[in-house]
Image (spheres, rainbow, N blue to C red):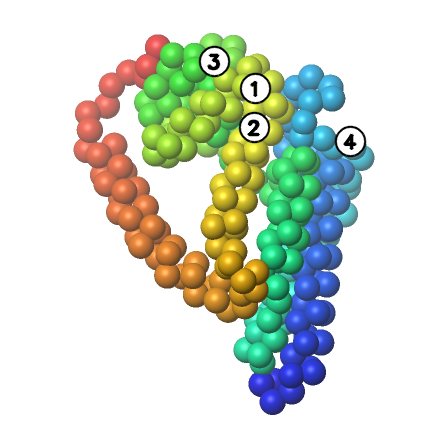
Amino acid sequence: MSGWPGRAGTAGRAGLIAIGASVAGTFAVAVAGPSVMEPALPGRPGQPPWSLGLHLSPYLAVGLTAAALAAGTAGLVLVLRAVRGGWSVPARAVLAAGLLAAVALTLVPPFGSSDHLSYAAYGRMLVTGHNPYTTTPAQLAALGDPIARAVQDWARSPSVYGPLATAIQALAALAGGTSVRLTVFVLGLANLAAFAGTALLRTGPDGRLTLTAYGQLFARDARPALESLAQSQSQTTRHRVLAPRGSAAP
């Protein structure tokens, strides 16, 4: 494709359209409300994140999710091939589109996993005087806590996250109170802030940077961080396995 710059541009634009369709499909599944792909978020009516409560059938929810994933994958392949052919896109346009998509997806519930319910429970433990590293959501739920009762997976697993993540979870729990919905929304705002901050730091002063350069920057900066995280997780796991077992925090 490197010898056909016109085709590279066509492929790149097609890829961006496919990625846009992927974002739209993802938003559609999320805004539709609880389904086989999206756990319910208990909370007062009208609280963010917002959804329509359409109760999609399992087939439709899974089908839309699969279509969105396929479109995103195809779009990414097309864009990367176009970049190899010499095509580029203004970094500010990518930044603006990415931020708009991130904001839109923050306003609707997360789906595809119920891990965010566990994060809310870990933060709730800290603000209610429990140790999230020795207490499980199931133990907190047994005390009648409404946040912990919403946990679906990992109910019998204490937190394995570091102090920064735990502090963010606790801040979300403070803001959300007894509302799972609002707590999850605040966690989403924290994710949005991290995404936006990283994107803004990576926007070049000339306002134009190829997608390949973005990938190189990520690969260069992410590898040491990921290696450090893996070592930290390994040490934490080894400490928890070797440490004497005691009773859960009150």
Q: Nearer the viewer, residue 107 or 149?
A: 107
Q: Nearer the viewer, mark 1 or mark 3?
A: 1
Q: Earlier in the sequence, mark 1 or mark 4?
A: 4
- 73, above or below 164, in the image: below
Report x, y in % for residue 149. 54, 19
Kindly check if marks 1 and 3 are in contact, taking CB atoms under 8 A apart as contact: no
Q: Furthest-bottom residue in view? A: 3
Q: Pointer 3: residues within 10 angstroms few (<14), some, or many (20+)?
A: few
Q: Earlier in the sequence, mark 2 or mark 1?
A: 1
Which quarter shows the N terminus?
bottom right
Count of numbered tags = 4
Q: Which residue is mark 2?
A: 186
Kindly check if marks 2 and 4 are in contact, taking CB atoms under 8 A apart as contact: no
Distance Cα–Cα, label 1 vs label 3: 20 Å
SS at circle 2: helix
Is 118 displayed left or right of 91 in the figure?
left
Q: Nearer the viewer, mark 3 or mark 4?
A: 4
The residue drawn where x is 62% and y is 24% is 181
The amino acid marked with disc number 4 is Gly
The residue drawn where x is 43% and y is 61% is 217
Q: Which residue is mark 1?
A: 176
Q: For residue 53, which numbered disc appears in the image?
A: 4
The amino acid marked with disc number 2 is Val
Q: Which residue is mark 3?
A: 142
Distance Cα–Cα, label 2 vs label 4: 21 Å
Q: Earlier in the sequence, mark 3 or mark 4?
A: 4
The answer to whether one can see residue 221 in this image is: yes
SS at circle 1: helix
Classify residue 103 by image quadrant.
top right
Is 220 displayed left or right of 196 in the figure?
left
Q: Earlier in the sequence, mark 1 or mark 3?
A: 3
SS at circle 3: helix
